[in-house]
Image (cartoon, rainbow, N blue to C red):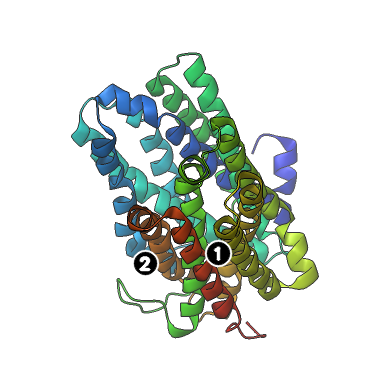
Amino acid sequence: MSIPFFKKIQNTPQGFRLANTVFFFISGFGYSSWVSRIPQIQSQLHLSEAEFGAVLFAFPIGLMLTMPFTGKLLNRYSSRYIMLLGAVMFNIVLSLPGLVAFIWQLVIVLLIFGASRNIFNLSINAQSLEVQKLYPNSIITRFHAVWSVAVFSGAGLGYVMVTQHIAPSHHLLGVSVLMMGLTACFYPMSVHNEPVPVKKKFFSMPEKNLIKFAVICFVSMACENTMYDWSGIYFKNILHASPKLTSAAFVFFATAVTLGRIFGDSGVTKFGIKKILLYSGILITAGFAICFILPYPYPTIFGYVLIGVGVSCVVPLVFSIAGRSSKLNSGTAITSISTIGYLGFLLVPPMVGFISEYLSMKWAFLIMALLGVLMILMVNKIGENE
């Protein structure tokens, strides 16, 4: 690279770490940029909430359909090549939602967008495990902290673009070009790994010793996405809180997630991965239980903070420990676990809606607390040598 500093750290642990950090930033910033323009794109196509909700479902379909394919790629090729493929696809497709004129065009774009995000995210996580091997202490949760900071940054830029009446097409195209530039600059600094191919069916359940990790991921992803989808509605419909307090509650949750990821590596160094996962399960359980037992704004905000800290580090730490204990290479192990984990991310939040419809969202949150107990039980099954 032309910049002397980058030349100096290229092919060093510091260079590999910087490159992986940048790719986590690209993932978070690009995704939140798209999310920030969803209302305008809905209006642009004149879609009702129900119609647009059906269209948005194309994104997770694209993500899930490519999960086995991504696992095959990571099983055969270095994760840096798959990361480049995912980043280029992700950045190109990011520029398209603002340009669509028909519903069918947006459906196709979101299918490819979901597929690209799956390839990109799994490969950057596989890269993070390769970088982690070069450091004696845990560094992996900070990559996810950068993703969270990038989400805040992308949302902030989106707010500015909306208030300045910048069209989604111009905004998303600009972000796409910027992220593509970062991809070109930092890809040469990414770490190269030689995967050991393992014979595996195109689609199969995780191997036996990975089931507990898959369940832990399932619970964490289910709880995190439930908070994204329902935390504001809980404040509005159950607690009858003001819009300002409702927004503040979500900010507290998102900030807790980010801070948990920033300081998670220090906790791992001090207590070890298994204890941090155990504490995470306890915090998730306690947080949702507080929301159920004390349905008032300030106790619930405290519960949200506990949940935020609880879910913050689970996925990267599970990837880290599973990648070491599995017979599969790290990329394939991550894909195997994510197949189950993403089901929690996609299926549980809608179930919260059904439970809320027939009982109450309070009872749905109590069930989420019981999922936290399931996570604690699974963590206790992790062996000391794993």
Contact between marks 1 and 2 (CB within 8 A): the answer is: no
Label 1: element kind: loop
Quarter holding residue 5 = top right
Type of amino acid at the residue the image marks with label 1? Asn
Q: Which residue is mark 1?
A: 193
Residue found 61% across the figure and 68% down from its top: 281
| Label 2 SS | helix
The answer to whether residue 167 is above or below residue 31 is above
Q: Quadrant of residue 338?
A: bottom left
Query: Would residue 140 appear left or right of 59 to someone viewing this image?
Result: right
Q: Residue 376's x, y, as percent?
A: 58, 75
- Residue 72 bears which disc, if any? 2
Q: Residue at x 72, y 64 (%)?
A: 138
Q: Quick check: 236 above or below 287?
A: above
From the image, which quarter does the C terminus lie in? bottom right
* Residue 117 relative to residue 143: left or right: left
Image position of 138 (left or right of 162):
right
